[in-house]
Amino acid sequence: MPKRLEGQVALVIGATRGAGRGIAVELGAAGATVYCTGRTTSRQRSPFGRPETIEETAELVTAAGGTGIAVQVDHLDVEQVRDLVHRIDTDQDGRLDVLVNDIWGGDPYLGDFRLPFWEHDLPRGLQVLHNAVDTHIITSWHVAPLMVKRRRGLVVEITDGRPDEFHDHLFYDLPKKSVMRLAVAYAEELGPHGITGVAVSPGWLRSEAMLEGMGVTEENWQDWYWREPEHRPPDWLGSESPRYTGRAVLALATDPDVSRWNGRTVYTRDLAPVYGFTDVNGTMPGHGIYGGDVLNDQLPRQEDYS
């Protein structure tokens, strides 16, 4: 593919796995230099205990055609974030074109989704807010001066759901809505300096943890649907790979008129027909075959779309 981001610099926080990894790889495929941050390295795992590492993500970025740079950072640590941004400023001569705030870090703390918020453990609930919101604000606070100085840049908040819907319970809904409001704040405060802020919401994301929980891989992810005929959750067939989220962010990063999205929350499935990108299997989740065909139980097996 054309190196549409050649010479540009991106920072993807929370790039260890999931959407963050997919976004980093797609930006790399377009030729960008991508700083990939997270807490899990080949030498040290985060408290979540997942095996994916930031070095692996950086290697995937480089293999895709970009330059991947892995940096271990705890984005709740202000000094670590300050040092990271200083390094980018020094190494890239003050250039940072794209910031993607993808840190979530909430799953181990959420508890039973069927319980009302007052029956959840308060410290654990507050930790979700620290992990999923404070990290974004701390990073944007340090990055903003670089972008303002150059009067250009894109800041993407990765979220879930729509602004007008309540999502499960307070400790899940509030952080997801908070980063949507961050996009609004960026539009108001950074917009006059030529910087665009957008919140992007994937659909049902086939993250590494999700695939592992279903007992499948990205290569055979539809098998879970066909293996559970008595359940057959149709939404699973409309799920999205992390690379689909990456292609949505790439489309925004290469759009000369990206400011039209300033302050908005948009779904990957809404951006796909506007920009004409597809998921890795050539489909466009949320459209076409993932409409009536699924609901009518007429969707062919994976190999028919390979």
Image (cartoon, rainbow, N blue to C red):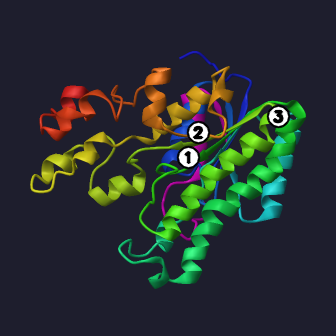
Q: Earlier in the sequence, mark 2 or mark 3?
A: 2
In the image, taking residue 268 as reference, residue 183 lies left or right, namely: right
Q: Which residue is mark 3?
A: 192
- For image coordinates 69% across by 55% down, the residue present is 136
Residue at point 49% right, 65% down? Answer: 172
- 61 drawn magenta: yes
Q: Where residue 271 sits in the image (x, y, percent)?
A: 49, 30
Measured Cα–Cα span from mark 2 to mark 3 = 27 Å
Crowding at dot 2, Cα within 10 Å, few <14 / some 14-19 / many 20+, comes out as: many
Q: Position of residue 206 (x, y in %)?
A: 38, 47
Mark 1 or mark 3, whichever is nearer to me? 3
Name the residue: 56% across, 54% down. Answer: 53
Q: Secondary structure at mark 3?
A: helix
Q: Amino acid at mark 1?
A: Gly
Q: Residue furthest front?
A: 164
Magenta part of the chain: 43-70
Whether tag 1 and tag 3 are in contact, CB under 8 A, the answer is: no
Residue 60 versus residue 169 in the image, above or below: above
Spot occupied by residue 8 in the image (x, y as percentages of width and height): 73, 27
Picture disc at residue 20: 1
